[in-house]
Image (tube, rainbow, N blue to C red):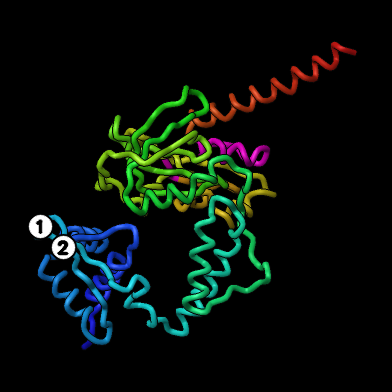
Amino acid sequence: MPVNKNAYLRYQYLDICFSNKQRRFNIDELIDFVSDKLGYNVSMRQIREDMSNMRLAPYHAPIKAVPYDGKKCYYHYSDPEFSIFNNELTMEEVTNLRSTIEMLGRYRGIPANAWLEEVISNLEYRFGCKANSENLIAFEQNDMLKGLEHLSRIIDATISHQTLEITYQSFWEEPRLCIVHPYYIKQYNSRWFLFGLNQTNERIENYALDRIEFFKYSQCPFIKNSTVDFETYFDDVIGVSVPYEETPKESIVLRFSDYRFPYVVSKPLHKSQKLGQEPNTICISVKPNRELSQQILSFIPDVEVLSPEWLRNEIRDKLKDNLQKYLSMHEDCTDNH
């Protein structure tokens, strides 16, 4: 029987639930999981019909209903190794999978990514996609970065919707205890950041993994993300620092040296970047944050802020302060002589 695209997607998500070895799903949880993944509500009747179809040819899924708590049941595959998608990879998909394994394999050997070893090994075994042993690709990574040891467990907690109790040490404050509902993980400038709802102040915050002193799973019920679309969350900023308060975007005009300008044109600072009216100038429209200033300072001495005036003054003052340090050192050396 032909399967339309929507049914195929529902089967995929149900297959994930039935294959889960750490969690069992009752009918209400199956409905919630599939509805959440699809972005619209699916009826109980539809889910029961899908399970009936999955039990038939060509899938023959061994879906087992296990009673608990009176009349309720949870559902899983009686064969823990079964998946309806075991044998549905095309040659093109296998080729793409092999390339993916080769790229992921570059991360092997990093303690925080030990979980990746098992994932890659299972893919290689199941689909016969042994990665190329030649080292052809290199990724930017800092194996000595503090906090990498947390990465795999935080990824698991984010995927599993597990609330966390985090002891966080910022650069300027005493350690603080936070109840965090993890929603998203992002890498920027070789550092990893967790984004989640802080239960106390009820706002989305980011937590650099290298500033997490300790964390454990919390018994607080998980609060689903219903406010932020992380596909677009970072669109108006450079980096990962999104202002908590509503902040308007500003037009930032920068002038570069003849030497550096072609580089900035070929590698835009932000997706909003456009060529300016004056020679060697570009304009970006972003919400100002500390990463914007850091990016500008990284181009010194080949950049000049033309506008806005407040940012031009801010960068000028930072350069003055830095120059004073060098002048003071020169004076100290002169005095000693």
Report which residue position mark 2 lands on. Answer: 67
- In the image, residue 97 lies at what x, y percent? 49, 74
> Under tag 2, what secondary structure?
strand
Please identify the quadrant where the N terminus is shown: bottom left
Look at the image and give the residue range highlighted in magenta. Answer: 285-307
Residue, x 37% and y 36% (percent of image)?
165
| Tag of residue 194 | none
Q: Could one spot residue 246 in this view of the protein? A: no
Residue, x 74% and y 23% (percent of image)?
326
**Identity, as a three-letter code, of the amino acid under mark 1:** Gly
Choose between 211 and 282: the one closer to the eye.
211
**Residue 298 located within the stretch drawn in magenta:** yes
Residue, x 37% and y 73% (percent of image)?
81
**Whole-Å distance between the Cαs marked 2 and 1?**
7 Å
Report which residue position mark 1 lands on. Answer: 70
- In the image, residue 307 lies at what x, y percent? 50, 35
| Left or right, residue 231 beside residue 50 | right
Q: Could one spot residue 51 in this view of the protein? A: yes
| Left or right, residue 236 beside residue 140 | left
Quarter of the figure with residue 197:
top left
- In the image, residue 75 lies at what x, y percent? 22, 66
| Left or right, residue 224 beside residue 299 | left
Tags 2 and 1 in contact by the CB under 8 Å rule? yes
